[in-house]
Image: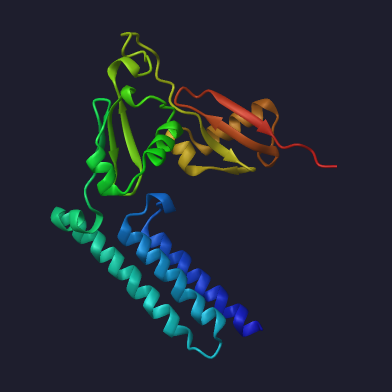
Amino acid sequence: MAIAALRTVIIYIMIMGALRLAGKRQLGELQPAELVVTLLISDLASVPMQDNGMPLLSGLIPIAVLVSLELIVSALMMKWHWLARLVAGNPVVIIRDGKLQQKALRLLRLTVEDLMENLRQQQVFEIRDVQYAIAETNGKISICLMPEAKTVTPATLEVQVSDEGAPVPVVSDGKLVDWGMAMCGVTPEWVQEKLRRRGYPLKQVLLMTADKNKKVCIVRREEQT
């Protein structure tokens, strides 16, 4: 039992490292080649976890080979665009100037119901409001609305607004967040000083956010009884 558990832990660490090297795409954003590698890795990993008589390297080596091939193919796709088109395909326009491209739908084997569901998920309910809808190589649909259907923004009204940036966490669960502090240009000392002025120990802060203008929001950890 202990050996089986140890083998599982080793394989788990190996797969986590392999997927970390492969990138951070979500399942719905994977290109076809990446999806194939992910499925093969899960299949290969299950064999040595279930069969204790199988040498562990027999399961780890194929995983390492697959990840290496994926990294090599990805590098070649960045260098040779024809290979990227061969492996991932090309984007396809399925709505142009408010009109369905029925030939493209048949080519993609995409039903009208599937298309309308994708549009609704992006808060679009009228095909005639869509200037372009493009089926991307990862299966998602990108939408560009007609000018008259677009949301009004300060730019369209020629109104200048101040750029405060997005609030990002600088403290999470009682710990400093390095990338958040770097984004809003603050230091650990600045964060500690802000907390000290409010009488909040770092360990008692569940969340603290800050923006580029140094505006902060602090959420204290609730006392547990």
Q: Which residue is drawn at 32% across and 32% down?
A: 143
Counting from the top left corner in percent of width and height, residue 218 is at 63, 29
Q: Answer left or right for 69 relative to 182.
A: left
Residue 134 higher or lower than 6, as above or below: above
Q: Which residue is drawn at 46% across and 42% down?
A: 179
Q: Nearer the viewer, residue 55 or 84?
A: 84
Q: Answer left or right for 103 relative to 29.
A: left
Residue 153 higher or lower than 93, as above or below: above
Total numbered circles: 0
Residue 100 higher or lower than 108, as above or below: above
Counting from the top left corner in percent of width and height, residue 216 is at 56, 26
Check the image and name the residue furthest to the right: 225
Q: Answer left or right for 16 relative to 129.
A: right
Residue 3 higher or lower than 224, as above or below: below
Counting from the top left corner in percent of width and height, residue 210 is at 52, 29
Q: Can residue 13 be seen in this view?
A: yes
Q: Is residue 92 visible?
A: no
Counting from the top left corner in percent of width and height, residue 206 is at 66, 38
For the N terminus, the image quarter is bottom right
For the C terminus, the image quarter is top right
Q: Nearer the viewer, residue 119 or 142?
A: 119
